[in-house]
Amino acid sequence: MDSATVYADDFTAGQRIPLGCRFVSEEEIVEFARTWDPFPFHLDRDAAAKSEFGGLVASGLHVLAILQVLEYEAVLHRTAMVAGLGFDEMRLLAPTYAGDTLTGSMVIRTVRMRADGRAVVTWQGLLDRGDTRVLSMEGAAMIRQRPTFPEVPDDAGRPE
C-alpha cells in the first residue's frame, strides 16, 4: 500500500499486510508491567527464572499493545478510520521474552460495505517470534469508503 489515505475499498478479503518488527527489551517489559500488569514474572528477573516461564516475559496486554502499534504504524495511521469496534478471540500462544523480536501481520477477513459510506473491516492480527506464533486476535473497525466525488480542500475557491 502506498502512503495515500487507505479507504475500506482498498482492502480485500485474504489480503496480507506485513507490519514490520519490534524488539522487546527487558526495560520495556518491566516498565509496562509496573503500571499495567505487576506480576513477578513480568517485573523481577529472579522470580521470573523460578516461574513456569524460566525467564522474564512480557504481559499479554503488552504484547497486544505491540501488535496495535505495529498495525497503526504500518497502515492504520493513514486509514480513513471512523472507530475501532473491538477485538475478539485474542490468544496468547507462546510467551514473549526479553530480547525477542516480534514480527506482525494483518490478514483481512471481511469488508462489509454499508449504504452510509462506511464499511466494517475485520482482520486477523498476528505476532510471531521467528517460526513461533505468540499472539493471534481478530480485530474490527469502521472505515470510510472512498468518496464518490473528489474531496475539495477547505480553502478551495477562496481568493488569495
Image (tube, helix red, strand yellow):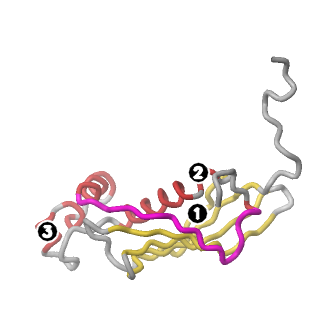
For the point 29% across and 55% down, the residue is: 28
The magenta span reads: 9-26
Q: Quadrant of residue 15?
A: bottom right
Q: Which mark is residue 86?
A: 1
Q: Which element type, helix, strand or loop, lies under badge 1?
A: strand
For the point 54% across and 68% down, the residue is: 18
Q: Which of the two labelled residues, at mark 2 and mark 3, occupies the earlier sequence position?
A: 3
Q: Which mark is residue 36?
A: none
Q: Position of residue 151 (x, y in %)?
A: 82, 42
Q: Position of residue 158 (x, y in %)?
A: 84, 22
Q: Which element type, helix, strand or loop, lies under badge 2?
A: helix
The span from disc 3 to disc 1 (Cα, nearest Å) is 34 Å
Is residue 82 visible in the rendered structure shown here? no
Number of other residues with Cα within 10 Å of mark 3, as a class: few under 14, some 14 to 19, many 20 or more = some
Is residue 155 visible in the rendered structure shown here? yes
Q: Position of residue 77 (x, y in %)?
A: 58, 51
For the point 27% across and 59% down, the residue is: 25
Number of other residues with Cα within 10 Å of mark 2, as a class: few under 14, some 14 to 19, many 20 or more = few
Residue located farthest toward the top when viewing the structure as drawn: 160
Q: Which of the two labelled residues, at mark 1 and mark 2, occupies the earlier sequence position?
A: 2
Residue annotated with mark 2: 77
Say what amino acid the circle numbered 3 marks: Ala
Residue annotated with mark 3: 47
